[in-house]
Image (cartoon, rainbow, N blue to C red):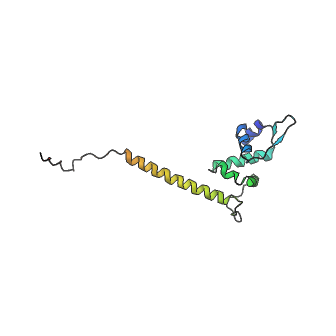
Amino acid sequence: MRIGDAAAAAGTTPRALRFYEQRGLLPPPARSATGQREYGPTEVALVRAIRALLSLGLTVEDLRSRAHRLPLLTGDEPPPCDSAGDSGPETFGPVVDRRLAALDAEIAHLTALRDNLARARRPSPGPTAADPPPSPSPT
């Protein structure tokens, strides 16, 4: 199938398929006699797996580091990223751990920014009925 049909089948755009190919996530597809990209069900499944991983919060760079393992995630039931025996340097476990740490750090940073902004927004309290009246200043 041509790029438009493959993109539609994977729930994305032709531009995304070309981008994944440029970034090394998707191997270069076969070409027709006229030079047009041709995709099959295997490539569509791979694009779906890529999109699913990106939607979980992984980045294109995260996926690039394990692009050769992406086809393992295209089955009906992809294995968990950190299953038994899946913790070596060539697996997704370390990538997921690094991304979780980065997200946790970003959440902590954003929470601190939000708290600082909320404190800055509060008006300073004015005198209340329970406050003693100000003492006269000596002249």
- Which picture quadrant has residue 11? top right
Please report the residue visible at 57 percent of the width from the left and 55 percent of the height from the top.
102
- Please indicate, yes or no, whether residue 115 appears anywhere in the rendered image: yes
Please report the residue visible at 74 percent of the width from the left and 55 percent of the height from the top.
69
Residue placed farthest to the top in the image? 34
Count of marks, rendered view: 0
Residue placed farthest to the right in the image? 33
Residue 126 located left or right of residue 83: left
Quarter of the image where the N terminus is located: top right
- Please indicate, yes or no, whether residue 13 appears anywhere in the rendered image: no
Residue placed farthest to the bottom in the image? 85
What is the x, y in percent for residue 20? Answer: 72, 44
- Which picture quadrant has residue 30? top right
What is the x, y in percent for residue 52? Answer: 67, 48
What is the x, y in percent for residue 9? Answer: 75, 40
Q: Please, is residue 103 above or below residue 3 in the view?
A: below
Foreground residue, 87 or 81? Answer: 87
What is the x, y in percent for residue 62? Answer: 66, 52
Residue placed farthest to the left in the image? 139
Q: Please, is residue 27 above or below residue 33 in the view?
A: below
Quarter of the image where the C terminus is located: top left
Residue 65 located left or right of residue 133: right
Please report the residue visible at 76 percent of the width from the left and 44 percent of the height from the top.
44
